[in-house]
Image (spheres, grey):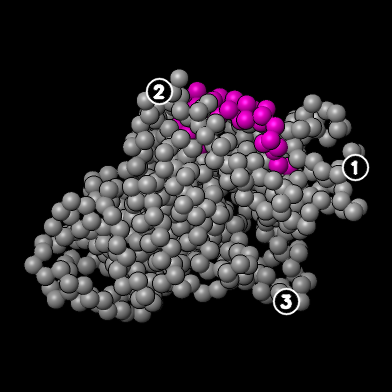
Amino acid sequence: MTIHKNFEWFKHKTVYQIWPRSFCDSNGDGIGDLQGIISKLPYLEQLGIEVIWLSPVYKSPMDDMGYDIADYFNIDPLFGSNADMDELIIAAKARNISIVMDLVVNHTSDKHPWFIEAKKGRDNPYRDYYIWHDPVNGGAPTTQRSFFLPSAWSFDSTSDQYYYHAFSNRQPDLNWVNPQILEEVCKIMNFWLAKGIAGFRMDVIELIGKIPLESKFTSPRAHELLKLIFKHTLANYEQTISVGETGGATVEDAILYSGNHDELDMVFGFEHMAQDEELGKSKWHLKLLNLPDFKRVFKKWQNGLYQKGWNSLFLGNHDQPRPVSRWGCDGKYRIQSAKMLANTLHFMQGTPYIYQGEEIGMTNYQFGSVDEFRDIEMINFYQEYINDAAWGKDRVMQSINAKGRDNARTPVQWTDGNYAGFSTAKPWIVLNPNYKQINVANDLNNPDSIWYFYQHLIKLRKELAVILHGDFKLLDEDNLHIFAYVRSYQEQQLYVISNFSIQTEYYTLGFKGKRACLLTSNYQRESLPINGVFELQPFETMAFLLD
């Protein structure tokens, strides 16, 4: 029986994503772990975080850094034990921090017992847990590419059939036509919910139930299946949170997913994240950001979901490069542009997601060699295109250094000491050498740092109803350099003005006769111009209330 659900409890909270492998190493093996996370809970509490999204810590051969799961019920020894996970849940809860786990059920690892059994023969009871097909004209059933490899089909010589994988060939897709998959997934979710976690971030969840022979990834059954998942799991707990990774979702899709809270509470849409990519091509095909187009995407989602759904607010995560390197200036104006990006995002309606290190303005690392890569996507892209005449090494490396996932996976820079305070041993991946200047310790010792700016934004979200409930109006939509908008709720108006350029810009806003209260500024602006003409320094941003 479904209990009374509370769908409002998380809306004023800010989520912090932890990529465990690179967060904090407690045992000196160069790999972050659960005890390392536990040791940093006071730090997250001080920042104001009340929800942690924990990237996968399940047992895995780590072909895709834990997104290839071999055992959903046990923690990988790299990260600790089930007892450590229990301790994390309890310790976090004591600090009013909820844990959201990553749920990866589009596929498993090829080392999962189900797939090991399935490969034994066509008559094996687990065969139908996965998607198989006879060869067509002596080859793969379709020409569909996977996200990581040239083909989404791999041949199994034991049975003379192909199996389907939307990602790596070591990540075979589950067959959601088989009703046993739904039962298995609900068992997994209820196991962790019973331990006290608050919910799940559901990896590529729009893909479950896809029809591979149609040569497309979208699934006609995703909504149906998510309703069943909710009914048998999250519906039976009062305060839960679920977010689905739905990269191809439109605003209309997002309303279906999240509008009634009977599938998901919100989705990760990627439309804004594609604005520096050539239309219709891969993420590796770079183009300069067009700010009006960027603004229009946010306008579409803010207005489209208003009173119909709920937005996820993010500019970075484990799959994306560092925001300050991508959308800002990671050189001379790193501090100003990092604050500007945060200010622009956090006053919108939705749940903000901060990716580890974002709160101190960590930057992309400039990879010099394929030997430094650890991510399967980057390695496969390099190997496929390095000898392509249209690309060549320089263009390949340019794209990787701009958009590669390992940019976000270098260790968190805690101090300027050995290995940036992340570990007492050499980390599993290269450490960004700028940790001597960019680190948590430095930011905590500087009241004007990026870190304290984020802390202030998180605090304001808990205090101002206009951030949670106000409508959204984009101002000066075609302005090439200024991102300005106003949120209105009851008698209050909240204005946000951001200069996305490296030059001084002038912006006029009329609010004569109204009482203004400055909330944030990254240039220590103490007052607003009486005449309404703003002289905005490079990457300057501010937010203020009008009553």
Q: Which of the pair 359/71 is nearer the observer?
A: 71
Horizontal relation, residue 135 to residue 333: left or right: right
Residue at the location (13% across, 57% down)?
547
- The amino acid beneath tag 2 is Ile
Q: Which residue is mark 2?
A: 3
**Residue 119 lies in quadrant:** top right
Residue named by callout 3: 390
Q: Which residues are magenta?
A: 172-200
Kindly tell me whether residue 5 is visible in this rendering: yes
Mark 1 / mark 2, whichever is N-terminal? 2
The residue carrying mark 1 is 160
Indicate the position of residue 128 as horizontal and vertical percent values. 76, 33
Looking at the picture, how far across and down is residue 539, in whole percent?
35, 71
> Which tag, 3 or 2, sits closer to the chain's start?
2
Residue under the image location 43 percent in, 29 percent down: 91
- Under circle 1, the secondary element is loop
Residue 251 position, x and y percent, is: 45, 54
